[in-house]
Structures are given as structure tokens and as C-alpha cells.
Image (cartoon, rainbow, N blue to C red):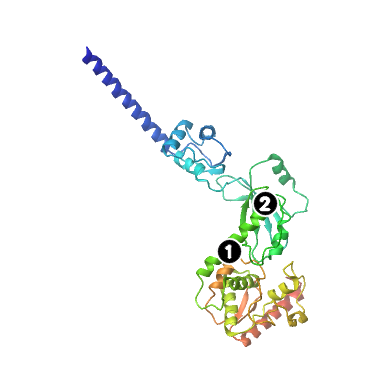
Amino acid sequence: MWKHIAANVLTLAVVAIACLAALIGLGQSRWSAPGPLEEAVFFEVPRGASMRSVSDRLAEAGIVSNGSIFRIGASYTERYDDLKFGTYEIPPGASMPEVLEIVTAGGPSVFPYTVTYVIRSQGPEIRVRERLPGQEEVVEIATFAPGDAVPEDYTALMERGVPITWRVSVAPGLTSWEVIEGLKGAEFLIGEVAAVPPEGALAPDTYEVARGSEVGELVQRMRVAQERILADAWAARAPGLPLESPEEALILASIVEKETGVPEERRRVAAVFTNRLEQGMRLQTDPTVIYGITDGQGPLGRGIRASELREATPYNTYVIDGLPPTPIANPGPEAIRAALDPEETAFLFFVADGTGGHAFAETLAEHNANVAEWRAIEAAREATGSD
């Protein structure tokens, strides 16, 4: 009798083990299989949310096939407590491990709406864009300047309280005064900047910020970023440059930034000034003269007078030898790298060529011919009234 009972128990145990193995196999299959999501969606993980609530919402949204299996998988991979709050884009067909990676990796939030506050030489501009999940193209909702009538679509977004990515974009070549003045119109930031940072100390870039964050914190991020960019470029600089410090490199980079907006020209323009420094020639660059007149507080708004070109000021490179005492703007990383790795060329002169770029020359005779061509282009434009 006992043998019969033992045999039955053993049979039941084998069946139970087989069933358990089947369940585990099914769970593993569903865990690693492509998910049921047919189209990309945005999914929010609220601050302080639990794995249980998130897994249930993932299942309700049709992102994962089973919330319980998702939780078991998260526990088995030791990521149960690793949720990072934010809004994420989930691609179609994402498996549970892929979804888990997205919501626990802590990458930047991807909101459908983006408000970018652009600081540029023409004045600040607010750009409101929408991106549908799974698409790279963005749709323009509104573009306006601070102080203008606020578009209704922008007001509606604010009233709905939808998640928004807030950004501040600083164009290269602005002075520190222009950047700080521009930030004063960013109503989504709070606080003030006690003093204008040193010229050249702010890294032009696009910065993601939180609505209601301190403007001083953003400015500090810009300063830290510029310090890092300059240090890295200085460490990788070309040998034999006529620059004695990173500060001098920043000055030269600011001149390069102001002289050309053509990426392909930066290293060539840097080479012209490097060659002039090596030969003891004056830099003779108009942007430094303008900075000396305006102190970096906005554009000159007119042509440079002949008397201003003759006036002895620390920034008049037609009069002084070498570099001016400080940068004349905040250069971008490309201009900094160009100043520290100039093109190998004998060019000593350049002038506008009528296409947005410049004509370069090794000799004064060649340069004078290029200047004559440029003046002819200017005269023709004035005659036709074109820009």
C-alpha cells in the first residue's frame, strides 16, 4: 500500500514539476517575445511610482502583454527598484526586456511638445513644436518673440498642463551681455544673474531645463561646459601655435567666430590670424574694433568710422599689436577647435566674396584684387537695390 501511495505522490510531483516548467517556459517566452504595441507611444513614469503601478499601466496601454510577467522579469533581472521618472518613447513591438531598459535606464525625457527659447543676435524667439511618437518630423505649433501677442495654441498648451520639454538655445558668437539680456525674457526660468560672466565664458549650445529652474544654474552649466570644451581643445592643440594660454586661444576663437559663419572656412580664417601673429602683423579685424566701441552691448548698427579705425583702444587691432585683452564673443566648440588646429596655409588676407564666404590671398596684391571684386559686387547690389 505504501509503495502505491509513494508512486502516486511521485507521479503527482513529476506532473507538478512538468506544469511548473511549462509555466516558466511560457513566461520566459512571453517575456522575451515582441510586444503587442503596434505604433510608437509616449509613456510617463511619474515621480515615486511603484513597479506594480507602472507594470499595470503598461499592460493597460497595450505595451506589454502581462503586467505580472513584467514584474517577475524586473525582479529576476534585479531592476525592480530601478524605475526612473520621466516620459519615454516606446517603439512598436518592444519586448518586455526592451521596455524595462527604457523605463529604468534614466535617459532624457521625450515629451511630444518642445518649447525652445532661442537667444540670437536678432533678439530672442520662442519656438513651439510637436513631434508624434515614432516620427522624426516635427510640426510647428507657434513661433513668436517675447512681448508679442501670445498665440492661442501656445496658451492652450499651458492651460492643458501637458508635459513639455523646455530648452534654451544660445547661438554662437553672442556676447555674454547679449546672452544674459536674452535670458531675461525667458519667463519659464526664475531668479536673476548677479553679474554678466566674463566674455567668452559661456558655451553656445541647446540646454534642456526644467520649468521654474534658476537662471543662475543654467548660466553655471554654460560656464562649466565652456571650460571643458576649451580644456579638451587645448590639450589636443596643434604644436607650435603662437598662443601662450587657453585664454589666448579663447580670444582668437572668438575672433574666428565673428569673422565667418561658414563651417568650412573656420580653420582657414584661424590660419590667417595665426600666420599674422607669427609674422608680427597686426590682425586688423573689424569685429574687435566694434567690440571696443559697443563694449559688447549689442550691435553697432552702422559702419565703422575712419576715425574709429585710427583711435588707439585696447580692442582696435588696426592699432595694437597681437590679440585684444579679452574675447569679443562666446565662440562655439568648432571655432575653438579651429583656433587650436588651424589649416596649414600661407594665407594672410581675406575679404568677402559675395557668396557668404571669403576670398583668401597670400599677397597684398592678390588681396587688393579680391577687394576690388568685392567692391564691384557691392556697387552692383546697391544699384539694383538687392541685399
Examine the rendering and report whether any part of residue 115 can be seen: yes
Picture coordinates of residue 101 (x, y %)? 47, 43
- Disc 2 marks a residue whose amino acid type is Glu
Residue occupying the far bottom of the picture: 365
- Disc 1 marks a residue whose amino acid type is Glu
Residue position for label 2: 214
Residue occupying the far front of the picture: 194
Picture coordinates of residue 264 (x, y %)? 57, 70
User: Is label 1 in a helix, a strand or a loop?
Assistant: helix
Q: Evaluate if marks 1 and 2 touch, with contact meaning CB atoms under 8 Å apart.
A: no
Residue position for label 1: 227
Which label's residue is closer to the chain start, 1 or 2?
2
Choose top left, top right, bottom left or bottom right for residue 257: bottom right
Point 72% across, 40% down: residue: 159
How packed is label 1: few (under 14 Cα within 10 Å), some, or many (20 or more)? some
- 112 or 374: which is nearer to us? 112
Examine the rendering and report whether any part of residue 168 can be seen: no
User: Is label 2 in a helix, a strand or a loop?
Assistant: loop
- 106 or 20: which is nearer to us? 106
- 65 or 79: which is nearer to us? 79
Picture coordinates of residue 178 (x, y %)? 71, 63
Q: Quadrant of the N terminus?
A: top left
How packed is label 2: few (under 14 Cα within 10 Å), some, or many (20 or more)? some
Choose top left, top right, bottom left or bottom right for residue 299: bottom right
Q: Quadrant of the C terminus?
A: bottom right
Q: Is residue 94 left or right of residue 128?
A: left
- 93 or 344: which is nearer to us? 344
Count numbered badges in the picture.
2
Point 78% across, 50% down: residue: 149
Choose top left, top right, bottom left or bottom right for residue 297: bottom right
